[in-house]
Image: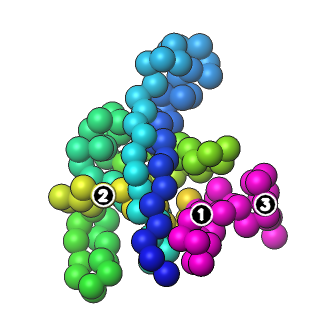
Amino acid sequence: MGEVNVEITLKNSADLAMVRIGEMPEQNVRSVTVNAVVDTGAMTLVIGEDLRKELGLAVIETRTATLAGGSKVNCNLAEPVDIIWKNRTALIRPWVLPGEKNVLLGVIPLEEMDVMVDPVNNRLVGIHGDEAIAVIR
Protein backbone atom coordinates (compact mmCIF):
# COMPACT_ATOMS: atom_id res chain seq x y z
CA MET A 1 0.00 0.00 0.00
CA GLY A 2 1.31 3.43 -0.93
CA GLU A 3 0.91 6.66 0.96
CA VAL A 4 -2.64 8.01 1.12
CA ASN A 5 -3.10 11.77 1.26
CA VAL A 6 -6.41 13.58 1.66
CA GLU A 7 -7.48 17.18 1.78
CA ILE A 8 -9.23 17.91 5.07
CA THR A 9 -10.51 21.05 6.73
CA LEU A 10 -9.84 21.64 10.41
CA LYS A 11 -12.09 24.07 12.30
CA ASN A 12 -11.78 25.38 15.83
CA SER A 13 -14.66 23.62 17.64
CA ALA A 14 -15.01 26.33 20.29
CA ASP A 15 -15.48 28.89 17.52
CA LEU A 16 -18.19 26.70 15.96
CA ALA A 17 -19.96 26.53 19.33
CA MET A 18 -19.89 30.33 19.52
CA VAL A 19 -21.51 30.51 16.07
CA ARG A 20 -24.25 28.08 17.14
CA ILE A 21 -25.21 30.25 20.14
CA GLY A 22 -25.05 33.46 18.11
CA GLU A 23 -21.94 34.91 19.76
CA MET A 24 -19.72 34.87 16.66
CA PRO A 25 -20.30 35.27 12.93
CA GLU A 26 -19.49 32.16 10.92
CA GLN A 27 -16.86 33.95 8.83
CA ASN A 28 -14.75 34.42 12.01
CA VAL A 29 -14.35 30.68 12.66
CA ARG A 30 -10.67 29.81 12.59
CA SER A 31 -10.24 27.16 9.91
CA VAL A 32 -7.54 25.73 7.69
CA THR A 33 -7.59 23.29 4.78
CA VAL A 34 -4.55 21.02 4.70
CA ASN A 35 -3.22 17.97 2.94
CA ALA A 36 -3.10 15.18 5.55
CA VAL A 37 -1.26 11.88 5.47
CA VAL A 38 -3.60 9.03 6.38
CA ASP A 39 -1.62 7.08 8.96
CA THR A 40 -3.31 3.88 10.12
CA GLY A 41 -0.42 3.44 12.56
CA ALA A 42 -1.39 6.67 14.34
CA MET A 43 -4.22 6.66 16.86
CA THR A 44 -5.63 10.13 16.30
CA LEU A 45 -5.02 13.50 14.66
CA VAL A 46 -1.46 14.80 14.91
CA ILE A 47 -0.61 18.42 14.08
CA GLY A 48 2.35 20.73 14.57
CA GLU A 49 2.65 23.72 16.87
CA ASP A 50 2.30 26.24 14.02
CA LEU A 51 -1.05 24.77 13.01
CA ARG A 52 -2.24 24.70 16.65
CA LYS A 53 -1.50 28.41 16.90
CA GLU A 54 -3.12 29.20 13.53
CA LEU A 55 -6.33 27.49 14.68
CA GLY A 56 -6.19 29.28 18.04
CA LEU A 57 -6.29 26.06 20.05
CA ALA A 58 -5.35 26.17 23.72
CA VAL A 59 -3.21 23.40 25.19
CA ILE A 60 -5.29 21.24 27.56
CA GLU A 61 -2.59 18.94 28.91
CA THR A 62 0.77 17.35 28.15
CA ARG A 63 1.24 13.59 27.75
CA THR A 64 4.02 11.25 26.72
CA ALA A 65 3.60 9.69 23.29
CA THR A 66 5.46 6.75 21.78
CA LEU A 67 6.55 7.39 18.19
CA ALA A 68 6.66 4.76 15.44
CA GLY A 69 10.36 4.09 16.05
CA GLY A 70 9.76 3.46 19.75
CA SER A 71 11.13 6.76 21.09
CA LYS A 72 9.06 8.74 23.57
CA VAL A 73 8.27 12.45 23.36
CA ASN A 74 6.18 14.88 25.37
CA CYS A 75 3.21 16.13 23.34
CA ASN A 76 0.55 18.68 24.06
CA LEU A 77 -3.11 17.82 23.65
CA ALA A 78 -5.07 20.76 22.31
CA GLU A 79 -8.68 21.85 22.41
CA PRO A 80 -10.94 19.95 20.00
CA VAL A 81 -11.15 20.54 16.27
CA ASP A 82 -13.79 19.51 13.79
CA ILE A 83 -12.25 17.50 10.96
CA ILE A 84 -14.18 17.73 7.71
CA TRP A 85 -13.58 15.38 4.79
CA LYS A 86 -16.16 15.51 2.02
CA ASN A 87 -19.55 15.08 3.75
CA ARG A 88 -18.09 13.58 6.94
CA THR A 89 -16.94 15.07 10.21
CA ALA A 90 -15.14 14.02 13.36
CA LEU A 91 -14.62 15.92 16.61
CA ILE A 92 -11.09 15.23 17.91
CA ARG A 93 -8.55 16.61 20.40
CA PRO A 94 -5.35 16.77 18.34
CA TRP A 95 -1.94 15.77 19.62
CA VAL A 96 0.63 18.49 18.96
CA LEU A 97 3.94 16.90 18.03
CA PRO A 98 6.96 19.18 18.44
CA GLY A 99 8.46 20.16 15.09
CA GLU A 100 5.82 18.29 13.07
CA LYS A 101 5.13 19.82 9.66
CA ASN A 102 2.74 17.13 8.38
CA VAL A 103 -0.81 16.52 9.50
CA LEU A 104 -1.39 12.86 10.32
CA LEU A 105 -4.93 11.49 10.23
CA GLY A 106 -5.11 8.40 12.44
CA VAL A 107 -7.59 5.60 13.06
CA ILE A 108 -9.87 7.24 15.65
CA PRO A 109 -11.02 10.05 13.32
CA LEU A 110 -11.21 7.57 10.43
CA GLU A 111 -13.56 5.40 12.50
CA GLU A 112 -15.66 8.39 13.55
CA MET A 113 -16.04 9.45 9.90
CA ASP A 114 -16.90 5.85 8.88
CA VAL A 115 -14.06 5.64 6.35
CA MET A 116 -11.22 3.26 5.61
CA VAL A 117 -8.21 3.05 3.34
CA ASP A 118 -8.74 1.35 0.00
CA PRO A 119 -5.23 -0.19 -0.33
CA VAL A 120 -5.63 -1.08 -4.00
CA ASN A 121 -6.41 2.49 -5.10
CA ASN A 122 -4.59 4.33 -2.27
CA ARG A 123 -7.57 6.44 -1.23
CA LEU A 124 -10.17 6.83 1.48
CA VAL A 125 -13.58 5.28 0.94
CA GLY A 126 -16.74 5.09 3.00
CA ILE A 127 -17.05 1.84 4.94
CA HIS A 128 -20.82 1.85 4.37
CA GLY A 129 -20.90 3.67 1.04
CA ASP A 130 -21.37 7.38 0.44
CA GLU A 131 -23.25 8.09 3.68
CA ALA A 132 -21.53 7.98 7.05
CA ILE A 133 -23.19 5.49 9.39
CA ALA A 134 -22.48 5.17 13.10
CA VAL A 135 -22.25 1.64 14.40
CA ILE A 136 -23.10 1.68 18.10
CA ARG A 137 -22.77 -1.54 20.05
Q: Kindly identify the amino acid type of the residue bearing the numbered disc 2.
A: Asn
Q: Is residue 76 visible?
A: no
- Cα separation, mark 1 vs mark 3, equals 11 Å
**Mark 1 lies on residue:** 124
Type of colouring: rainbow
Q: Earlier in the sequence, mark 2 or mark 3?
A: 2
In the rendered structure, which segment of residues is drawn in magenta?
110-137
**Mark 3 lies on residue:** 129
Count of numbered marks: 3
Q: Kindly identify the amino acid type of the residue bearing the numbered disc 3.
A: Gly
Q: Nearer the viewer, mark 2 or mark 3?
A: 3
Q: Is residue 104 left or right of residue 74?
A: right
Name above or below for residue 83 compared with residue 2.
above
Residue 120 screen position, x and y as percent = 59, 78
| Residue 102 numbered mark, or none | 2
- Cα separation, mark 2 vs mark 1, equals 18 Å
Q: Earlier in the sequence, mark 2 or mark 1?
A: 2
Q: Is residue 50 left or right of residue 91?
A: left
Quarter where residue 31 is shown: top left
Crowding near the residue tagged with mark 3, few <14, some 14–19, many ≥20 C-alpha atoms within 10 Å: few
